[in-house]
Amino acid sequence: MLGILSKKVETQQQASPGLWRLAMRRLKADRVAMVSLGVLFCYFIILILSMTGVIASNWNKEVAESYAPPTFMGADQTLQNAAQKTANTAALPENPVDPLKDVIKELNAQIATEQASGGAVDYYGVQDPLAEDMKVIDQQLGGHLLDQQSELKKTLPFGADKWGQDVLLKTIKGAETSIVVGLVSALLAVVIGTFLGAIAGYFGGWVDDVLNWFYSIFTSIPYLLLVLAIAAVLQQKGILSIVLILGLTGWTGVFRLIRAEYMKHTSREYVLAAKAIGVSHLRRMFVHIFPNVSHIALVQMSILVVGFIKSEVILSFLGFGVPVGVVSWGSMLNEAQSELILGKWWQLVAASVAMAVLVTAFSMFTDALRDALDPKLK
């Protein structure tokens, strides 16, 4: 009895590990893959917390002054720069032939008088023409308006946008939109490409010809032009529209690879044996063959997630993405292009860095996963 048990143990120890176990071993041995997986795990934790409302639920609330700078710049840095520019302008020598020199003298005198008396001045040090009106409105409202403005923060860790919204909270909420769009769109594209590729590669003949003709139509049109055409046809902004746009246009690469794999596996012994015992076509396609090609679909999905996150940013930047009231990295970059003219760079940096870190980590993990699942590296 002991001899039989020892033989069974030896047989189990001598049995070669499967594809997924070998892949996990190679992934664990790859430090870059593990670091990338840790970064992705942090992003997904933030995604879950944002979706459940634990963090960034009040991202659209006005909590700071308009264009409040990051904390490390200091609250008065912008105002000091503006005052310095005004002082430098006032210190310029007069042009004797300037027809407006007298008017400029009067304006500079008024500004100096207003600043000396402590009156209300705007960003450029000029008297605020609405200061008296605001005082009257504030008195009518019981004095709450100016009190609320005085409670607004002068700085934030990552600064504020035009509306006084926290850029850090916007970046977190934008990550929720961009990551969800990337994942769901990639899943839709992989499902479509895998299903059509399995049918084309398994049946062959006229079925393969029709699906290849359909595939050729999609690949003959430039990708960005096809995306914009479908976006114009849908005519509705929203996350669902973006998912449909990207999912219906991104399945072609998955189709080509899955079709080739099914053409190879259809003629192999285990599929012919299943056919001989009367197994149905669907069972042979998705129970017998698909587990042997599933690693290709998984790798393609991880690649498409990266591409679709970037595509969502492009669509939102061009105005075909998320609607008003929904924030994403693309909409933040769209806002940042007008802010750069005013020298407000922090929203651009926050969205760009967040997207770059996620895309880089996902790309590096995808490369490691593709190498780990390669049967030639067993």
Image: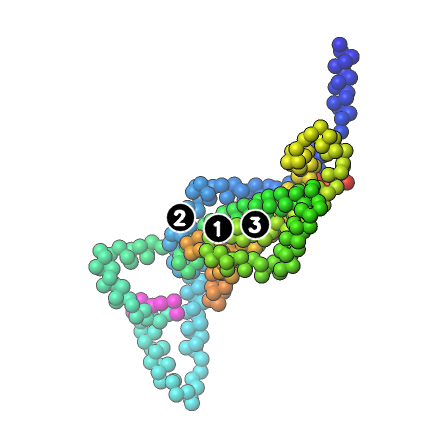
Q: Secondary structure at mark 1?
A: helix
Between 38 and 149, the one lying in front of the other is: 38
Q: Nearer the viewer, mark 3 or mark 1?
A: 3
Q: Residue furthest top?
A: 1
Q: Nearer the viewer, mark 1 or mark 2?
A: 1
Residue beneath label 1, please? 239
In the image: residue 353, left or right of residue 106: right
Which image quarter is the C terminus in?
A: top right
Disc 2 residue type (three-letter): Asn
Q: Residue at x 42, y 56 (%)?
A: 324
The image position of residue 122, as x and y in percent, is 35, 67
- Tell me whether circle 1 and circle 2 mark residues in contact (CB < 8 Å): no
Disc 3 residue type (three-letter): Gly
Residue beneath label 2, please? 58
Q: Secondary structure at mark 3?
A: helix
Residue beneath label 3, please? 247
Disc 1 residue type (three-letter): Ile
